[in-house]
Image: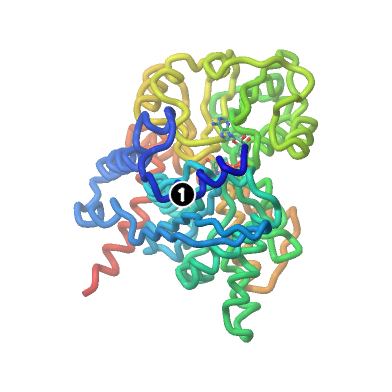
């Protein structure tokens, strides 16, 4: 992309709050979470007052901040942080760098974090934020400048017992290390060690946890194993399609390959690719790391997005963006199970059609909760000055994921509802108990 276009993207940040592209415009993302929430609330007969409170975020912050780039040029950026609910604990949720970040997306993603943390039994609320720009257009040095300036602008709107960011699309452990370092340095010297847990998803050297990088994919895999066990389905010899081959998608595919699952189709922002013999997900990940996309990977052939969703595979893992499975895709999907690695990949029509067609959906707030669970482990280790080994992290994650999966399926059976509604029901019951006990003051 040209410097001019990149500049337009960053500067244009102020121009629109509407949804950015064709897939996003099918439904407003916040409407999706609102309707999902309404179903969960109805299933447990939620008190109307509590429903009113949890239907909107507590705080919505939009910040315009200047950055002097390495070239000397000053450019304005637009950053967001939405804090949805903190009745169960500090706000918790990722920071996204993407040219399409917009307010209603952050509101929806923050709301999902509230339900995800409550469902997982973590002492956290929900938050989400981002900066509206395409990180692929900026150098390492400029990404550091943007991250540090954004963290400085957020100031005390984040904090280790208040609001704890983590990586999301377009950000990684390096971004978190810069955020942590900037935050630490704007705090008093005596507090600097104590406030390092202001972000999770840091590199191991900077206080990150073993297993955080692959945690979301690992959690997705535990859900797939539980699903397979309940359906008496044999994973060995089965097939997989993954949309998005970043953190979540690539770890999911790599872990599943060790169980004999063949990755026959994969897609990213450059297109979709098919190989009947199966891709080697480890080699694919290496190629992706080197080239920042799947484009040019030898082996396999290009297919269209439509062909990708209509493929005959056993397991489909959307692990890219939200609102990818709408009416059209849901009608064509032939997988036995859709496991939502991404947040909000299925819209309301998509959900309805998949249910009508008897295709199982393991909902995002359950399926991709492994990341925030290990983020919680990281935060706990930092707080206690501990460092757990990889096996300990993995065992704790596994126990939690399998238990949470079973509680969702038990709840779905009790309430005679789908897994998504059951997940909301459990999360809302947890919040309801606290709201009823504490009341609203003054
Ligand atoms: P990432 O940036 O590492 O990877 C994103 C992938 O999606 C890339 O392969 C990219 O090419 C692809 N992609 C982007 N635009 C696309 C498009 N238009 N069509 C097809 N593919 C496209 O991001 P990630 O961390 O793996 O996150 C992916 C999803 O999982 C997001 O919805 C995120 O919110 C969710 N999630 C991530 C974590 C985590 O721990 N990283 C945890 C929970 C949920």
**Residue shown at 77% from the left, 33% from the top:** 287
Q: Helix, strand or loop at disc 1? A: helix
Horizontal side of residue 292 vs 425, given as left or right: right
Q: Quadrant of residue 244?
A: top right
Q: Do we see residue 377 in this rendering?
A: no
**Residue shown at 60% from the left, 31% from the top:** 269
Q: Quadrant of residue 74?
A: bottom right
Up/down of 275 relative to 191, above or below: above
Q: Which image quadrant shows ligand 1?
A: top right
Residue beneath label 1, please? 116
For the residue pair 188 and 408, the one nearer the viewer reads as: 188
For the residue pair 87 and 400, the one nearer the viewer reads as: 87
Q: Residues within 10 Å of mark 1 (few under 14, many from 20)?
A: many
Up/down of 350 relative to 368, above or below: above
Horizontal side of residue 279 vs 400, given as left or right: right
> Which of the colour schemes (rainbow, by chain, secondary structure, one colour) is used?
rainbow
Up/down of 342 relative to 371, above or below: above
Up/down of 123 relative to 136, above or below: below
Q: Position of residue 141 (x, y in %)?
A: 70, 57
Question: Split into 4 quadrants, where in the image is the N terminus?
Answer: top right
Q: Position of residue 202 (x, y in %)?
A: 67, 60
């Amino acid at each position: 992309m040209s410097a001019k276009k990149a500049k337009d993207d960053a500067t244009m940040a102020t121009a629109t709050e509407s949804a950015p592209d064709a897939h996003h415009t099918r439904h407003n993302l916040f409407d999706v979470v609102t309707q999902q929430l309404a179903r969960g609330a109805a299933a447990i007969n939620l008190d109307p007052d509590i429903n009113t409170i949890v239907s909107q975020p507590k705080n919505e912050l939009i910040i315009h901040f200047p950055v002097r780039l390495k070239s000397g040029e000053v450019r304005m950026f637009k950053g967001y942080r939405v804090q949805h609910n903190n009745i169960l604990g500090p706000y918790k949720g990722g920071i996204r760098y993407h040219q399409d970040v917009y307010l209603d997306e952050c509101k929806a993603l923050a709301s999902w974090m509230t339900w995800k943390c409550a469902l997982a039994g973590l002492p956290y609320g929900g938050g989400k934020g981002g900066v509206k720009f395409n990180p692929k257009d900026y150098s390492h040095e400029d990404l550091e400048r943007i991250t540090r300036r954004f963290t400085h602008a957020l100031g005390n709107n984040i904090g280790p017992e208040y609001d704890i960011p983590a990586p999301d699309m377009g950000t990684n452990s390096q971004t978190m290390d810069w955020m942590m370092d900037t935050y630490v340095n704007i705090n008093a010297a005596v507090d600097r060690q104590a406030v390092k847990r202001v972000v999770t998803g840091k590199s191991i050297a900077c206080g990150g946890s073993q297993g955080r990088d692959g945690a979301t994919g690992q959690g997705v895999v535990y859900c797939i194993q539980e699903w397979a066990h309940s359906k008496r389905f044999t994973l060995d010899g089965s097939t997989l399609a993954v949309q998005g081959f970043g953190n979540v998608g690539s770890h999911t595919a790599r872990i599943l390959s060790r169980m004999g699952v063949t990755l026959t189709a994969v897609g990213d922002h450059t297109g979709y690719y098919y190989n009947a013999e199966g891709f080697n997900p480890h080699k694919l990940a290496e190629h992706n790391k080197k080239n920042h996309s799947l484009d040019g990977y030898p082996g396999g052939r290009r297919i269209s997005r439509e062909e990708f969703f209509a493929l005959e595979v056993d397991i489909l893992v959307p692990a890219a963006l939200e609102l990818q499975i709408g009416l059209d895709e849901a009608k064509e999907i032939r997988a036995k199970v859709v496991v939502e690695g991404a947040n909000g990949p299925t819209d309301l029509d998509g959900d309805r059609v998949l249910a009508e067609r008897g295709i199982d959906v393991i909902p995002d707030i359950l399926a991709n909760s492994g990341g925030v669970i290990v983020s919680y482990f990281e935060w706990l280790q930092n707080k206690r000055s501990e460092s757990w080994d990889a096996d300990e992290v993995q065992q704790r994650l596994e126990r939690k994921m399998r238990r949470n999966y079973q509680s969702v399926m038990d709840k779905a059976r009790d309430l005679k509802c789908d897994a998504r509604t059951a997940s909301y029901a459990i999360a809302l019951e947890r919040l309801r108990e606290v709201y009823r006990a504490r009341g609203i003051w003054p």
